[in-house]
Amino acid sequence: MNAAEIKNYIIENLKDKLKQFEINSNEIKKDFDFVQSGLLDSMAFVEMIAGMEQHFNIEIDFEKIDEDDGFTTLSGINELFLKAK
């Protein structure tokens, strides 16, 4: 698993939502925030992460996450998963 695979997984699983919000997948850059953009609410974000944990067979320890680190951005998600592998 690498950053490109993580991004591709997210885009594939959010393709309907991206279309609904008229967001092109090219707009999903490192600093794209899935919650602040309104694309996902906090519960949908947690559900996405849970799906990713299952897909990549990785468990994220949410108690160790510093919410100020931008973990709801693409780069934050990459960091979470790449550190956990």
Image (cartoon, rainbow, N blue to C red):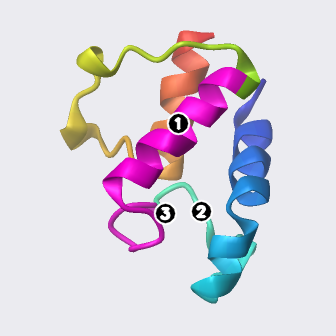
What amino acid type should be assigned to the residue bearing mark 2?
Lys
Residue bounds of the magenta highlight: 33-54
Q: Is residue 66 above or below residue 27?
A: above
Q: Residue at x 61, y 24 (%)?
A: 53
The x, y position of residue 66, in whole percent, is 22, 29
How far apart are labels 1 and 3 at the CA level?
Answer: 16 Å
Task: Report the front residue among 84 and 35.
Answer: 35
Task: Report the front residue among 38 and 67.
Answer: 38
Whether 40 is among the magenta residues is yes
How far apart are labels 2 and 1 at the CA level?
Answer: 18 Å
The x, y position of residue 18, in whole percent, is 65, 75
Q: Nearer the viewer, mark 2 or mark 1?
A: 1
Label at residue 29: 2
Quadrant the C terminus occupies: top right
Question: SS at mark 1?
Answer: helix
Question: SS at mark 2?
Answer: loop
Q: Which residue is mark 3?
A: 32
Q: Which residue is mark 1?
A: 49
First in sequence: mark 2 vs mark 1: 2
At label 3, counting other C-alpha atoms closer than 10 Å, the crowd grade (few under 14, some 14-19, many 20 or more) is some
Quadrant the N terminus occupies: top right
